[in-house]
Image (cartoon, grey):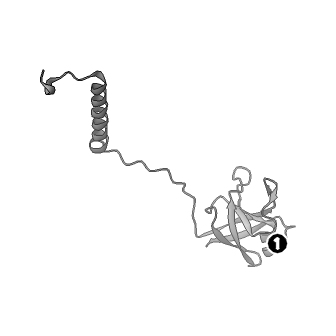
Amino acid sequence: MNKLLRPIPMLEWLIILILLTVASITVIFRFASNSPVYEPAKVNFIHKEIITGKASWYDYSLNGIVWSKDHHTAASRDLKRYSKARVTNLANNKSTIVFINDYGPDASVYPDRIIDLSSHAFNEISDTNLGIIDVKITSL
């Protein structure tokens, strides 16, 4: 019997079938598909140069570690986390620079508040006894 005409064993047929299937799927998806290339979704934060509104202060504990008490930190839903911003008290024109480390204040609970400052940062521009003040925020 001629070697070129020998019967092909079942395992070789299976390997050939798998290779042809993978090759045809690759060709179909690479050349026949007009769908855009998948890219992971990007989180779009609201980014404004200047925002005005109400500010409050807070001190909280993250996993039992006091984080914001002696730091210039803030929570904002409008500014990108891990960015910096200048917060100016509109009543006395005092300002401080804060590091945005959290998201908040919750708009469903406090719709008029645009930023929560750490007590240390709030105390630099106003008296914490006031609780809420009008501010201007400039992203840096």
Q: Quadrant of residue 4?
A: top left
**Image position of 48 with respect to 110: above or below:** below
Q: Is residue 26 left or right of residue 71?
A: left
Q: Quadrant of the N terminus?
A: top left
Q: Quadrant of residue 104?
A: bottom right
Q: Position of residue 74 (x, y in %)?
A: 72, 64
Q: Amino acid at mark 1?
A: Asn
**Image position of 3 with respect to 105: above or below:** above
Q: Residue furthest bottom?
A: 93
Helix, strand or loop under label 1: helix
Q: Residue furthest left?
A: 2
Q: Position of residue 71 (x, y in %)?
A: 77, 69
Which residue is found at the position 73% from the left and 66% from the top? 73
Q: Nearer the viewer, residue 17 or 112?
A: 17
Q: Position of residue 19 (x, y in %)?
A: 29, 34
Which residue is found at the position 54% from the left and 54% from the top? 43
Q: Is residue 29 left or right of residue 112?
A: left
Which residue is found at the position 80% from the left and 58% from the top? 65
Q: Nearer the viewer, residue 23 or 121?
A: 23
* Residue under pointer 1: 123
Q: Nearer the viewer, residue 111 or 63?
A: 63
Q: Position of residue 114 (x, y in %)?
A: 69, 61
Which residue is found at the position 51% from the left and 54% from the top? 42
**Image position of 72 with respect to 59: above or below:** below
Q: Quadrant of the C terminus?
A: bottom right
Q: Residue furthest right?
A: 129
Label 1 crowd (10 A; few <14 / some 14-19 / many >=20): some
Q: Is residue 129 left or right of residue 13?
A: right
